[in-house]
Amino acid sequence: MAISDLRFPTDRTLVMGILNVTPDSFADGGRYNSIEAALHRGKRLLDEGADIVDVGGESTRPGSERISVDEELARVIPVIRALSELNAIISIDTTRAEVAIAAIEAGAKIVNDISAGLADPTMLKEVAARNVPYLAMHTRGNAKEMTSLATYKDIVAEVLNELAERVREILAAGISTKNLVLDPGIGFAKEAIHNWAILNALPQFEELGFPVLIGASRKRFLGELVDASDTDSREPATIALTAILAERRIWGVRVHDVKAHRDAIKVAGKFK
Ligand code: PMM
């Protein structure tokens, strides 16, 4: 299975809809924490035109506590199984190989690993063995450490170097070049100034030679820009960002409100 086998449209930016099955996730925390509610939300993301539904069971917000593998599996597997039966393309947002393997067995087609293989030493080999697309995101340290690790002399050069190092390891583990997507990790071990510098340097990230996905939806740096402390009120700024990224033909965006972003991408598509 290569990314091309998933038959995504190639003439526009793809939309990955966020489905956090967590009671504590920062943008939809507590609202969609039961399986039923998660399924309902997942179906809505699909109806609104999500190309991928990204199912995650563990909150990655800075400072959050880890949950057990069993708890993570219990949250995500029933949701993945049910949505896969609807022919949805599911990505599993996890840093654990065991969860990635179970998710693939339940029908997930993409592994989204915010640690790019650093959190679990067996992740890369297990993904390579199953030949599924792998989305590798840049971060530093774990959720508890990352805020203190947001120190850079040259943010763009350092993140590029660190991602390139991950790419070498990912390919050495046997994951195919056709199956790799990169993500500079907006908000992960990065302050607002770092996030903006990265977003201004997207061509350099694309020059690494892989599709690039951006996950900026409702994140704090947007709230700081438009003075929006609650996450929902950061949505207009997120949509504006998607329009710009889509006009620049970024491969994908990871967002909460799929319909609005599909619309923004349509508008961007009118600019050549
Ligand atoms: N952000 C979050 C979780 N998973 N995965 C990728 N690939 N990129 C991201 O930027 C990303 C992610 C945190 O946001 P959430 O709590 O709203 O899911």
Image (cartoon, rainbow, N blue to C red):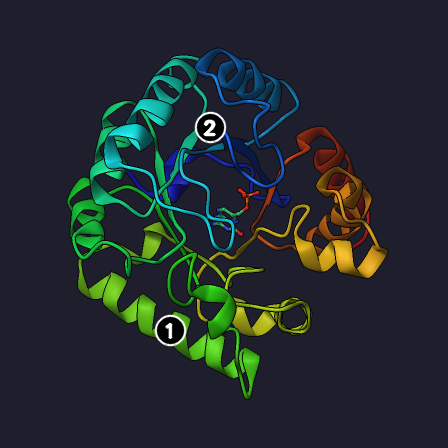
- Out of 47 and 144, give the one closest to the viewer: 144
| Mark 1 residue type | Ala
Label 1, secondary structure: give it: helix
**Residue 21: which numbered mark, if any?**
2
Task: Calculate the distance from the C-alpha at mark 1 to the C-alpha at mark 2.
Answer: 31 Å
| Residue drawn 34% across the image and 17% down it | 78
Please say if 8 is above or below 48: below
- Out of 250 and 159, give the one closest to the viewer: 159
Label 2, secondary structure: give it: loop
Q: Quadrant of the C terminus?
A: bottom right
Please say if 193 is above or below 229: below
| Mark 2 residue type | Val
Measured from the top left, where is residue 109 in percent x and y?
35, 33
Q: Which residue is mark 1?
A: 164
Measured from the top left, where is residue 72 in percent x and y?
32, 32
| Residue drawn 23% across the image and 30% down it | 102
Residue 230 figure quarter? top right
Measured from the top left, where is residue 113 in percent x and y?
37, 50
| Left or right for 171, reference 208 | left
Q: Residues within 10 Å of mark 2 (few under 14, many from 20)?
A: many
